[in-house]
Image (spheres, grey):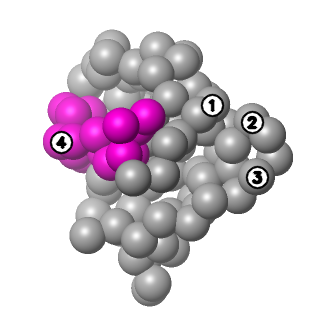
């Protein structure tokens, strides 16, 4: 995943995901990434540095094959659609 400027010059690169399939960006510029290959949701800073793994297979709720996500800043809830077409809701802290 690369961040590029208006001329196409690469500004930052993130390479730690294994099949990043969907992402969402909050008002502070953080990027949430659904990483299908690693079965996790990643939180990246605005310069694409990994801040933390939000949810993975070791979390309270086992996360398998996330395909879509959306973040609601008003409620601090993240909605994740899993490969099984099931929607899970997580509250971020």
Task: Write the residue at 50% across / 29% down.
Answer: 39
- Contact flag, marks 1 and 2 (Cβ < 8 Å): yes
- The answer to whether residue 73 is above or below residue 40 is below
Q: CA distance from mark 1 to mark 3?
A: 11 Å
Residue 66 visible within the image: yes
Helix, strand or loop status at disc 1: loop
Q: Secondary structure at mark 2?
A: loop
Residue where numbered disc 3 is placed = 86
Asked where in the image residue 82 lies, by quadrant, the reply is top right
Name the residue that disc number 1 marks: 65
For discs 4 and 1, the disc positioned in front in the rendered view: 1
| 18 is higher (above) or lower (below) than 41 | above
Q: Is residue 42 among what the camera can see?
A: no
In the image, what residue occupies the spot 69% across and 50% down? 81
Quarter in which the C terminus is drawn: bottom left
| Quarter of the figure with the N terminus | top left
Which sits earlier in the primary sequence, circle 1 or circle 3?
Answer: 1
Q: CA distance from mark 2 to mark 4?
A: 25 Å
Task: Compare residues 68 and 3 and report the one nearer the observer.
Answer: 68
Q: Are marks 2 and 4 in contact (CB under 8 Å)?
A: no
Against 55, residue 38 (above or below) is above
Kindly indicate the quadrant of the structure image that contains residue 44.
top left
Label ID, residue 20: none
Sequence-wise first label, 1 or 2: 1
Q: Earlier in the sequence, mark 2 or mark 4?
A: 4
Q: Which residue is mark 2?
A: 83
> In the drawing, what numbered circle is on residue 51?
4
Q: Which residues are magenta?
A: 42-59
Q: How far apart are the two marked residues, 1 and 2, measured between alpha carbons?
A: 5 Å
Name the spot of residue 68 as percent of width and height, x first.
66, 45
| Residue 49 horizontal side relative to residue 35, left or right | left
């Amino acid at each position: 995943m690369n961040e590029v400027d208006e001329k196409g010059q690469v500004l930052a690169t993130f390479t730690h995901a294994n099949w990043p399939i969907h992402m969402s960006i909050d008002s502070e510029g953080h990027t949430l990434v659904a990483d299908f290959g690693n079965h996790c949701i990643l939180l990246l800073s605005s310069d694409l540095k990994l801040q933390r793994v939000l949810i993975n297979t070791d979390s309270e709720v086992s996360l398998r094959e996330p395909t879509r996500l959306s973040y609601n800043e008003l409620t601090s809830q993240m909605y994740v659609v899993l490969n099984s077409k099931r929607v899970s809701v997580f509250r971020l802290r």
